[in-house]
């Protein structure tokens, strides 16, 4: 291939036949030219998606005395109720993420190795938490709480951490399954497992020392999705009367005015976006990665 | 929960709770609203989401644009129920930025009967997470469209349009329909945004359930709330069966 350019130059110099454009080159030039249908949707999407965020940012800069300033952002740090709620949510997120990965990774590996027929079924199940109404789940949970014995109520339901974590684990399982499965599909699982076994590794050390490092980006994706879900879930927490981060954001409006509320919203959005955006660079760094798709 | 919906407070078997919901005009209106929101936002989200996903995929693979769109889609589709409600209030609320701007050029939204806590407002806000969800769901299918198919069609003399009509659209249809069904289910069951946006003033089914459970309007309506929940599950079950049916079709060409 390295000889081709000089050859082309010579031929042109001699006034001979123009070399036919290489198909790859043609595609590349087509790709770079901005097309009307692409530009249209990007402009529309930019207005629709960025517009409200800019509006929210301007809104968050207006102080309660009508002047502009960063005071609302300062108030976030001083607000202890918000801080407590954030810590509760972060604790729930951390425990949920660990439990979810510990459950999902072995399942994915087992299904891929031993029961590939289950893949279809599990892919169908992964769609459930998107369509099942959280309000219905909450209603069912409230019934459960009403009918459970007193020792269970005082043991589990009296605190947000123990009351919500089991249900968030269930909510996050399918999303994480999807994320980790994408990662495991991309590696040569059978060869890795066989090699590790033939060197005398146990199932546990195969999983933690061979498979986990190979799918760490996908696992991180599952962790971030779980964190996003736990920090964002509001319906179940509201109905079961737990004060988590998003519930506190809604209640904040009555205490401090809408400016602080909007400021917290923007920061939380940016935080989760930052997590996923950073992850896309980790995912792109892996050899042979053709897609930055995580979820 | 089904048990609770089918029994009286005394524990006897009854269909009374279901007939209460069917004869209550508020509950039926809520169902109509929820179905309309689901339908409209699913269609809007599906069309614009597919368009956006196709536009992003046509760009440089692994480029900045793809990273930003895929991260932003993840945030908006899975996390952002409450924050985005506040973004919309800041934009189109009574003192929102867009409302004020439009007033300056002589358009008064609120005198025309618009509020952000209306059906139109909810459709606008829900579409904000429906489009990103569509991008997430449809991107794998779009990636499955092989460039070889287009080249094969072109070498057989097909124009761009006839490639779209005879190859791309037929192959994509099952995946598109499946994703649209999921979008419908998502909007139908979503509550977080509505809760933060309207504080429960608009009648959609989740609001009715919440009010029945918390006894905000009439006390002891728990079981009616559960009956509403079971009815929602029935709708969602139809959506899921439809999804699984088209999904097996979608897998024939797209891996």
Image (tube, rainbow, N blue to C red):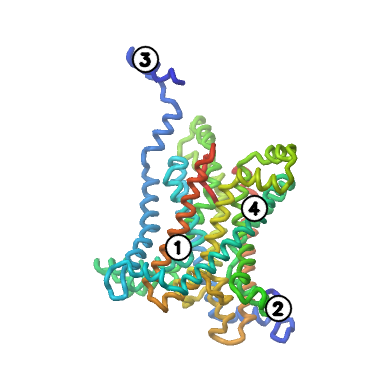
Mark 3 on the same chain as mark 2: yes
Which disc is residue A268 wearing?
A: 1
Sooner in the amino-acid sequence: mark 3 or mark 2: 3
Distance from Cα at disc 3 to Cα at disc 2: 89 Å
Residue depicted at x 42% and y 33%: A28
Sooner in the amino-acid sequence: mark 2 or mark 1: 2
Mark 4 on the same chain as mark 1: yes
Which disc is residue A11 wearing?
A: 3
Residue B192 visible in the shown view? yes
Q: How many marks?
A: 4
Point out residue B83 in the picture as x, y percentages from the top left corner.
44, 66
Residue depicted at x 36% and y 14%: A10
- Judge depth for marks 2 and 1 and give the one in front: 2
Residue depicted at x 37% and y 15%: A11
Mark 1 on the same chain as mark 3: yes
Q: Choose between A218 and A92: the one closer to the eye.
A: A92
Distance from Cα at disc 1 to Cα at disc 3: 61 Å
Q: Give neighbour class at mark 4: few <14, some 14-19, many 20+ (Cα, 10 Å).
A: some
Q: Give neighbour class at mark 2: few <14, some 14-19, many 20+ (Cα, 10 Å).
A: few
Query: SS class of the residue under badge 4?
Result: helix
Sooner in the amino-acid sequence: mark 2 or mark 4: 4
Residue at mark 3: chain: A
Q: Give neighbour class at mark 3: few <14, some 14-19, many 20+ (Cα, 10 Å).
A: some
- In the rendered view, would you say B186 is above or below B204? above
- Residue at the disc numbered 4: A123
Q: Choose between B57 and B146: the one closer to the eye.
A: B57
């Amino acid at each position: 291939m390295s000889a081709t350019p000089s050859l082309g130059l010579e031929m042109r110099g001699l006034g001979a036949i123009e070399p036919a454009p290489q198909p790859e080159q043609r595609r590349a030039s087509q790709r770079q030219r901005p097309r009307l249908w692409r530009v249209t949707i990007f402009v529309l999407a930019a207005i629709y998606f960025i517009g409200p965020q800019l509006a929210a940012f301007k809104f968050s800069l207006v102080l309660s005395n009508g002047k502009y300033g960063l005071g609302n952002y300062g108030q976030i740090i001083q607000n202890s109720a918000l801080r407590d709620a954030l810590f509760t949510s972060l604790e729930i997120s951390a425990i949920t993420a660990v439990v979810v990965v510990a459950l999902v990774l072995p399942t994915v590996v087992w299904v891929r190795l031993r029961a590939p027929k289950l893949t279809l079924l599990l892919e169908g199940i992964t769609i459930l938490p998107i369509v099942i109404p959280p309000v219905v789940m909450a209603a069912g949970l409230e019934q459960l709480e009403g009918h459970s014995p007193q020792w269970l109520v005082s043991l589990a339901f009296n605190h947000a951490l123990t009351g919500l974590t089991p249900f968030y684990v269930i909510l996050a399982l399918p999303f994480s399954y999807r994320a980790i499965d994408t990662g495991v599909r991309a590696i040569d699982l059978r060869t890795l497992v066989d090699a590790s076994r033939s060197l005398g590794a146990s199932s546990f050390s195969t999983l933690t020392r061979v498979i986990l490092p190979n799918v760490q980006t996908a696992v991180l994706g599952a962790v971030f999705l779980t964190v996003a879900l736990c920090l964002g879930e509001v319906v179940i927490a509201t109905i079961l009367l737990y004060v988590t981060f998003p519930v506190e954001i809604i209640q904040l409006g009555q205490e401090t005015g809408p400016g602080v509320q909007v400021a917290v919203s923007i920061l939380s959005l940016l935080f989760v976006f930052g997590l996923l955006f950073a992850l896309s660079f980790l995912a792109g760094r892996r050899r042979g990665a053709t897609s930055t798709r995580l979820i | 929960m089904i048990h609770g919906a089918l029994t009286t407070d005394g524990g006897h078997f009854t269909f009374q709770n279901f007939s209460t919901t069917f004869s209550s005009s508020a509950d039926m209106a809520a169902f109509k609203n929820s179905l309309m929101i689901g339908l409209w936002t699913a269609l809007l989200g599906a069309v614009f989401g597919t368009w956006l996903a196709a536009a992003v995929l046509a760009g440089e693979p692994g480029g900045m644009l793809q990273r930003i769109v895929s991260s932003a889609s993840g945030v908006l589709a899975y996390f952002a129920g409450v924050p985005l409600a506040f973004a919309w209030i800041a934009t189109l609320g009574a003192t929102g930025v867009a409302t004020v701007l439009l007033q300056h050029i002589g358009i008064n939204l609120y005198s025309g009967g618009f509020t952000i806590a209306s059906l139109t407002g909810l459709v606008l806000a829900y579409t904000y997470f429906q489009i990103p969800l569509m991008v997430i769901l449809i991107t794998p299918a779009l990636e499955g469209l092989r460039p070889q198919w287009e080249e094969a069609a072109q070498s057989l003399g097909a124009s761009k349009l006839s490639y779209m009509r005879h190859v791309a659209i037929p192959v994509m249809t099952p995946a598109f329909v499946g994703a649209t069904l999921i979008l419908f289910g998502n909007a139908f069951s979503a509550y977080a945004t509505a809760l933060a946006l309207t504080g429960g003033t608009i009648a959609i089914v989740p609001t009715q359930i919440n009010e029945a459970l918390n006894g905000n309007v009439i006390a002891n309506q728990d079981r009616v709330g559960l009956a509403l929940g079971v009815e929602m599950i029935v709708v969602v079950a139809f959506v899921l069966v439809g999804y699984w049916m088209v999904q097996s079709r979608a897998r024939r060409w797209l891996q």
